[in-house]
Image (tube, rainbow, N blue to C red):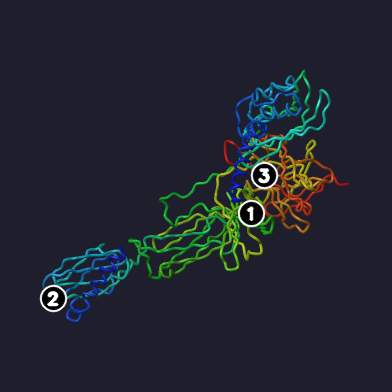
Amino acid sequence: MTGRILALVMALLTVALIVVGTVWPFQSALVTAGVDSGADMLRPSSTPQAAVENLATQIGRRDWEKAYSSLANKNEFEETDFVRDLAGSYPSLRSHASLDSFDVRPQHASADDAQVKLNLRWSTVVGTFLDSRMLRVVKAGDRWAVAWPIVKEPRVPPQVIPVNYLRWDVIYRGAEDDWGAQDAESPHVRIVDMHPVDRGGGVVIMGELLNEDVVPAFVNVKATLLAKDGSALATEDSFDKISHILLPRQVTPFLIEFHNVALSQVDSVHMQPSSSLVAASADPVVEIEDQHLTPGSQASLSGKLLNQSGQVVNVAHVLGTFYDNTGQLIWVSDGYAERALLPGTPETFAMSVPPDIASKVKTQRAVTTTYSSNRFQ
Amino acid sequence: MKLRLASFLGGLIVLAGGQLAAAQGSLRLPKTVEAGAAFSIHTGGSGKGVLYIVGPAQVLRRDVQLGEDISFAPGDMHNAGHYLVVLTGGSSTEDGAFDVTAVHQPTTLSFIAKPSRLPVDLHDGISGVVYVFDTFHNLVLQPTPVSFQLSGVAGASQTRTVTSKNGVAWTKLDSASKEGAAKFEARAGNVADERIIQQVPGDPCKLKMDVRPVGQRLQLETEPVRDCSGNAVPDGTIVTFTEIYDGGQATVDVPLKRGVAKTEMPAYKGATISVATGVVMGNEIRWGKE
């Protein structure tokens, strides 16, 4: 009897929520749902908040023309500048991102001027990133319009950048070769540090892997947790928490997460570093400058990436290795640069660090892996 | 297939069991036959019979005239191993066995050399294993002398002669102190096979950098990077420069090009700049100290 009543209540509640969502849709949800019905779903820009919400909705739909035409300061820049600001000039995480959600936070307002913070959460294949803009909203007649704080993406002047190009190519053995005939040997790699910890209801294994060979390697690390009776509790690999391409003598951190396994259950860990020969290039060289570890509840390691080569880097992945005052590895984190790295042009990055870990960090080391659209590096 | 062969063979032996005494002595077999050689089997009695020869990878059936020699041409029996012979004729059945051995003269070597790439100056770092085969790809079980020779770009070549046991000979050799490709040859009789072993520089020794200001930045450059035997560390090897200054840090991984690593980093007074490659640390410089 009780079950029937509960089912009836749930059904009525569901119908009620559907009606509410249809009649009074949430702007951010419209963007997420990919609603494409145009301006008819937008509210009149009768308040600063409504004007910003309408702009964010148009940005989410990539309706650049309408978004640009609604701006109060469009005489200060062209529509292409506006698009480059939001989507980037070169293919990058930003240019392939879709707006996951946004929120609007009014800061202060007067009769004809207001300041509103807009948080745009963009979704990419490697996770979400936040793009926060402090917007000035001005009243023009009976409507409000946003003055967009344009960030002009730097352009690299036409030039020739000489690069002493270095790359490795590999010829493997053929199927017709005798079984005793040697193949091109896989690179020799070695785990130089490994540290398991109990964290967040699971086990985390961190470490560092060295390519001790003279050829580039495509690497991965797999770990198997073994119980006291020798049975395997779980097997995981480092997935994207590693720099997969290791040039000679290069060191990468790695992090492997096991959920729902306690360290007390684990008797031993079987580590399996793997490596294979891969064609690779020694360029581009990326400097990681202005690295700062900011402690606190929103602890992060931030800095700037400076592409010292002449090639545009479309996606840059930064891995951070954190050590305590005894030099022991205590955490591995990663982050991505949203925009493409242009030659000689600094681009910011940030990666979060657990607050309790950040307070123990004495030193850190950051490495980058870069991806260019014309080849895998 | 193996199961069918075993059943067939079992049936023949059971069949032969009851009448073996009556026919014993009339079938004369060679004790051993060299693979690929011609041979004959003598049969006694009279009338028609059938001869079966069952070996590890071969089964022969011949209709024979009892009392005559049965000849086998060169190449009829070429797989080494233990062969069972069963002769049936009329009401009698007789069996026997002989061995086919590999040809003593090796004609093929399977040479496994590991690793194909290793650092210089490594004791017993190179292993060579040779399997000796005859012309029919039978493993030559007779002890056979196999010589291994490693000749590199410099220095005297290393030679070892090892006698094979059960068809296998192996040895271990040191890598040379000078980098370069070495020829690793194995020879048994007139047969030889070779592999190329790449001897590469070891860990860098005495990694040292210099720094000089270039405008608002610092130019960092290592001295030519060499291993402890004086070999130039190959281009592409990553050298990491780290600059720690008040409240911040900068790092850059730079590949060696033309033997040196060169980069630019921001100039901060009092900054400590260090250099490393792999797990080898280089010198440290404090920039702008009083």
Mark 3 chain: A
Residue A325 horizontal/vertical position (percent): 78, 57
How far, Cα to Cα, is label 2 from label 3?
88 Å
Residue B165 horizontal/vertical position (percent): 43, 70
User: For residue B41, which numbered disc appears in the image?
Assistant: none
- Of residues A290 and B70, the one nearer the viewer is A290
Q: Name the residue located 66 percent from the left edge and 46 percent from the top edge.
A: B259
Q: Are marks 1 and 3 in contact (CB under 8 Å)?
A: no
Side of A366 where B31 appears, left or right: left
Label 3 SS: strand
Label 1 SS: strand
Viewer-nearest of labels 2 and 3? 3
Mark 2 chain: B
Indicate the quadrant where residue B100 lies.
Answer: bottom left
Residue B35 horizontal/vertical position (percent): 30, 66
- Of residues B159 and A44, the one nearer the viewer is A44
Q: Is residue A217 visible?
A: no
Indicate the quadrant where residue A168 lies.
Answer: top right
Q: Quadrant of the C terminus of chain A?
A: top right
User: For residue B45, which numbered disc appears in the image?
Assistant: 2
Residue under numbered circle 1? A257
Q: Residue furthest left?
A: B47
Q: What amino acid type should be assigned to the residue bearing mark 1?
A: Glu
Viewer-nearest of labels 1 and 3? 1
How far, Cα to Cα, is label 1 from label 3?
21 Å
Residue A206 vertical placement versus B259 (above, below) = below
Q: Residues within 10 Å of mark 2 (few under 14, many from 20)?
A: some
Q: Name the residue located 63 percent from the left edge and 28 percent from the top edge.
A: A62
Task: Mark 1 or mark 3: name the one nearer the start of the chain.
Answer: 1
